[in-house]
Image: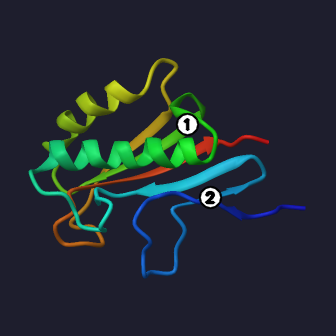
């Protein structure tokens, strides 16, 4: 029987009906966006937004008792194809080989108008 469990983080508490991370059957599910501790999308462009998103991811993983080494798959959403080279550069600072399976998608927009990047991540969770 599957048991869904929310992971407590120190990320901004959203007013939307969501959890920053859920575990079930030893898998962690999370989506991360470039917001600061006040829930504001960080300014400064794709580099700053990617770094904030990755830092939010690391915090969430640590809150679940796992590291980037347990990440199995990452879905990257960006609003411009040119952003992918910047995302790749920063992404490589956080992951080591063997790298997670990955897909990158260029979208017309994300949930918040000024967001440039979003990550959906699946990881092996602690038992």
Asked whether 78 or 3 is in front, the reply is 3
Residue at the extreme left: 44
Relative to 48, say whether 31 is above or below: below
Q: Residue at 79% x, 42% y: name it.
A: 127
Seen from the viewer's position, the closer of residues 100 and 40 is 40
Residue that mark 1 sits on: 71
Query: SS for tag 1?
Result: strand
Can residue 55 be seen here? The reply is yes
The image quarter containing residue 21 is bottom right
Say whether disc 1 or disc 2 marks the residue closer to the N-terminus.
Answer: 2
User: Would you say 56 lies left or right of 115 here?
Assistant: right
User: Which residue is most to the top?
Assistant: 97
Label 2, residues with CA under 10 Å away: few <14, some 14-19, many ≥20: some
Measured in 3D between alpha carbons, the distance from the residue under mark 1 to the one under mark 2, in whole angstroms, is 16 Å
Q: How many marks?
A: 2
> Which of the 4 image quarters holds residue 87?
top left
Where does the image place residue 105, in percent across and percent down from the top left? 32, 51
Asked if residue 104 can be seen in this view, the reply is no
Of 55 and 27, the residue lying toward us: 55
Residue occupied by mark 2: 7
Q: Is residue 14 left or right of residue 2?
A: left
x%, y% of residue 23? 68, 55
| Left or right, 68 with reference to 45 | right
Q: Secondary structure at mark 2?
A: loop
């Amino acid at each position: 029987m599957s048991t869904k469990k929310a992971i407590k983080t120190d990320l901004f508490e959203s007013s939307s009906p969501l959890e920053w991370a859920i575990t079930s059957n030893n898998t962690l599910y999370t989506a991360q966006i470039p917001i600061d501790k006040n829930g504001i999308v960080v300014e400064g462009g794709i580099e700053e937004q990617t770094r904030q998103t990755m830092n939010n991811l690391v915090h969430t993983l640590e809150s679940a008792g796992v590291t980037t080494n347990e990440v199995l798959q990452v879905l990257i959403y960006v609003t411009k194809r040119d952003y992918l080279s910047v995302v790749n550069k920063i992404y490589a600072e956080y992951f080591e080989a063997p790298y997670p399976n990955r897909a990158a998608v260029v979208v017309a927009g994300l949930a918040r108008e000024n967001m440039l990047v979003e990550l959906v991540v699946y990881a092996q969770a602690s038992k």
